Amino acid sequence: MYLQYCSFLCALASLTYANYFEDDDVYGQSVEDDYCISPSTAAQFIYSKRDKPAAFAEPLEEEYGCEGTDAAADCFTPTHQLTEVDRARLHSCLDQMREVLAESIPEQAMVQAVLDTKFDVQKALDLVLSQGSKQNAKTKNKDAVILAKTTKGKTRDYQSARMESEIVPKITKMTVSGKKQSMGFEVPCAIAEENGHTNTPQKGLLPEDISVASGVLEAVSKSTPSPQVAQVSEEQNMVPTPAKKSSKAKPQIDVKAELEKRQGGKQLLNLVVIGHVDAGKSTLMGHLLYLLGNVNKRTMHKYEQESKKAGKASFAYAWVLDETGEERERGVTMDVGMTKFETPTKVITLMDAPGHKDFIPNMITGAAQADVAILVVDASRGEFEAGFETGGQTREHGLLVRSLGVTQLAVAVNKMDQVNWQQERFQEITSKLGQFLKQAGFKESDVAYIPTSGLGGENLVTRGQSSDLTQWYKGKCLLEQIDSFKPPQRSVDKPFRLCVADVFKDQGSGFCVTGKIEAGYIQVGERLLAMPPNETCTAKGITLHDEPVDWAAAGDHVSLTLTGMDIIKINVGCVFCDPKEPIKVCTRFRARVLIFNIEVPITKGFPVLLHYQTVSEPATITRLLSVLHKSTGEVTKKKPKFLAKGQNALIELQTQRPVALELYKDFKELGRFMLRYSGSTIAAGVVTEIKE
């Protein structure tokens, strides 16, 4: 008798404990069992609800009512009619349904559904969920009223409340405050009320949460029996969509007014320095920057010492702009160096272009982004002639900048100290250059000639003090001439266009692109379209002259930090534009070209290298349409068999890959291009028609 009484007490305790913890639930349970009896005795007498003897079932139901999950199931069903096999099948079905529904459906409804469907789990789930959706329709309005009343006047952050109380199922922590301790998962108020529970609505919920609660119910009622699917449906209702706000929500700025206020009212000017190799371009501009205070004495002293050790003492000022080790070792500028300095009335973006013929493509990239140019020539005997005659870069650079839209030019006759500031030498150079530049299309009033000495610093920032110079030259110094340039009209009213000059990965998220804004303006947070990859992204940040800004406009050399796109899809030459007014992309277009001095006539199928902004793309001349009159543009000959030097012609070009282009009549900045063949420039042209 005593043994039976002990066994009965053990069964009662185990029943109460098993109500809250499944067999596979290890949280909150002791790992070690302090048994005072042997395992065989424990297996014989310790109660387990999984293999409950029939002898204990009926006395428990009669004496203690319905406690525990399985006991509840037995309470609501005619257990005396179920065999041991059916009872086991019932428990198995209930376990599977709990994995799907958790505690959202009462035990009574699940048991009844299993019996009605004859132990078919799928049919039982469908039956339970269909019953839940009907109850949801009845209680939806009631839930809305309760939630609205409860949340009136609350100012707490409703998003965080949702995240904590509804999206993520949270296990209730044990408390010692004397309140009733609940186990398992908390459920939203709407589900709790549907199931007959009367939980108090949480504080901080706003009326928007009504739709969230109903969304949870709809997810439970409509989805397949999977808790993950229901959770995804909840999250889709919760996720904010700030990306759709785009730039419409941002206040539109008056760009022209802001441009006048920026930099203390100073105007922006993009300046490129060009000329034959070893004419002294980098030294001239490096010394100018040093005299303006843009390079401190400590840095300049360091460059002087390092250049002496390298055996290039005269290259110290050139190292201000030639920053790479290869450029300093070879003594030749290879890439376009970019920096900023200010004059009394302007902010100058300086681009130091390479002069060597091997780096003409880089020079074209710099010249395409410039408004004005400084052409540096060497006044030394023989050096000027070498650069100006056939094969020299003085002529080619002059033609290139004019073809790329530069109309104002300052000619710096450098190294005049080596010829003792002779007026005769200066006049000889200016007369030869003046005739050539006039043929190239420059107006005499837009060209200025200035004698300078880059190494000595004479006539750069202040007017020359040398007696040999002041005897015959009374004109401006180089800085005064730069300050007197007229800035061009900015196309801020046109759609946004930026041609990528460089792409690199930044430390934070996203990546960076640099380039000159050719038209329009941009604000932080705006959506952009990249062509030709045809991908959209967001401008996370804008940097102008190494300083973060909120906006930038046409003419600015900027660095954009972009997110929402893979860096692999962006190449040098891609164009970022307004998604509403995208730039055209094609592989075939027609253009009007001017043929330069060429040795081989141009025929159909002639291979060329197309230079357009920062793009360098192989192309083929597929058709020779007509020869045009130089001044009037009238057709003088249709379908010519070849094109000779000096001719104006209408041709059709085919590129290997898609290129983003604009018509010259719509965007002059984006309608110009150059054609090169076998290391020399053979033609300049403008886009007249784009073939889709």
Image: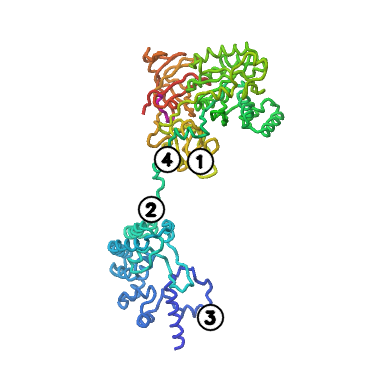
3D distance between C-alphas at marks 1 and 3: 67 Å
| Residue tagged 4 | 527
Q: Can residue 184 be seen in this view?
A: yes
> Which quadrant of the figure contains the N terminus?
bottom left
The x, y position of residue 25, in whole percent, is 46, 68
- Indicate which disc residue 36 carries: 3
Q: In front: 359, or 119?
A: 359
What is the number of callouts on the image?
Answer: 4
3D distance between C-alphas at marks 2 and 1: 28 Å
| Residue tagged 2 | 236
Q: Earlier in the sequence, mark 2 or mark 3?
A: 3
Amino acid type assigned to the residue bearing label 1 in the image: Phe
Left or right for 379, reference 38: right
Q: Residues within 10 Å of mark 4 (few under 14, many from 20)?
A: many
3D distance between C-alphas at marks 2 and 4: 23 Å
Q: Earlier in the sequence, mark 2 or mark 1?
A: 2
